[in-house]
Amino acid sequence: MKLKEKNALITGGAKGIGFATAVRLANEGCNIVLLDLFENELTEAKLKLEKISKVKVFVKKTDVTNKNEVYDSAKIIENEFGAIDILINNAGYVKGGDFLDQPDEEWEKTIDVNLRSFIYTIRAFLPSMNKRNSGFVINISSASSALGVPGLSIYTATKWAVWGLTESMRFESMNAGKNVRWVSIHPSYIQTGLFAGAKLGMLGNLIVPLLKSHDVIAKAIIKAIKKDKNIMFRPRTLKIAILLRGIMPDKLFQAILILMGVPQSMRSWKGRN
């Protein structure tokens, strides 16, 4: 897909991966819509984007876990801004801690933000894409969609679900003869933001090094759109984990994860302030 003059919508777009992606898309000539819960940060993001580009920028405070707000925002956006060509489901939430230590409201929020919101936005914007027979839906999953991580049990479950949702919807679009593309993006730990402080052991960090910035993922998203990719892993060495999981006995694979420090990787987690 050529990006110039396309309309891209990003949830959780005021900061982190969302804003880094908005910057790159704006530099490619895309018009930008940002949805986020934090109005002040949305306003700041809009001003920054307007300084670096001449594209149209539209921001809308929206609780993406509230389906009525999502559907109402979608109507406003399509009426006032235009049809969405690229939907990037980036909104995310993480709260580290063992399963039984998590209060109900924490795991419920994790599912609401990381999975339900994706479903709501897809249901809101996919009909228009189908009608125009064109579109890209990009869902931010995680490295934890390929392996279980202690201290991230519910988060991991949502990211496995996002990968499955993306793949299932890709085939639904194919079966319906619709030219709507579906991409899942799988980042490992990033030094800043939601996963600040999380890290693998020495061996793990050699194989799957920490990502230095959100822009690494933003670049992967642009590449996925331009080259029509189905899936992107960052760092690329994450593909090794998928390969090993497929060919190794499970106990041997788990032993390798232990050597890499995966079970202890959330012990130093600090998260975003």
Image: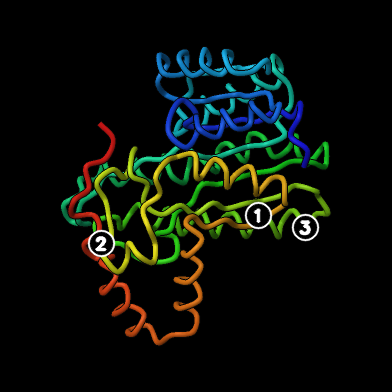
Residue that appears at 63% across and 37% down: 87
Label 2: few (<14), some (14–19) or many (≥20) C-alpha neighbours in 10 Å: some
Q: What element carries label 1?
A: helix
- Picture coordinates of residue 84, whole percent (x, y): 70, 30
Q: Are marks 3 and 1 in contact (CB under 8 Å)?
A: no
Q: Residue furthest bottom?
A: 249
Q: Quadrant of residue 137?
A: top right
Q: Is mark 2 on a helix, strand or loop?
A: loop
Q: Tell me which label, 2 or 3, sits earlier in the chain.
A: 2
- Picture coordinates of residue 72, whole percent (x, y): 58, 22
Q: Which of 216 and 40 is in front in this view?
A: 216
Q: Tell me which label, 3 or 1, sits earlier in the chain.
A: 1
Q: Residue 174 carries which label?
A: 3
Q: Tell me which label, 2 or 1, sits earlier in the chain.
A: 2
Q: Which of 128 and 203 is in front in this view?
A: 203
Q: Horizontal placement of 247 versus 128: left or right? A: left
Q: Which mark is residue 259?
A: none
Q: Looking at numbered disc 3 in the image, what kind of residue is underneath it?
A: Met
Q: Horizontal placement of 173 versus 247: left or right? A: right
- Picture coordinates of residue 31, whole percent (x, y): 68, 23
Q: Looking at numbered disc 1 in the image, what kind of residue is underneath it?
A: Met
Q: Mark 2 points at which residue?
A: 150
Measured in 3D between alpha carbons, the distance from the residue under mark 2 to the one under mark 3, in whole angstroms, is 36 Å
Quarter holding the C terminus is top left
Residue that appears at 46% across and 46% down: 115
Q: Horizontal placement of 200 versus 165: left or right? A: left
Q: Are marks 2 and 1 in contact (CB under 8 Å)?
A: no
Q: Horizontal placement of 273 versus 59: left or right? A: left
Q: Residue 169 carries which label?
A: 1
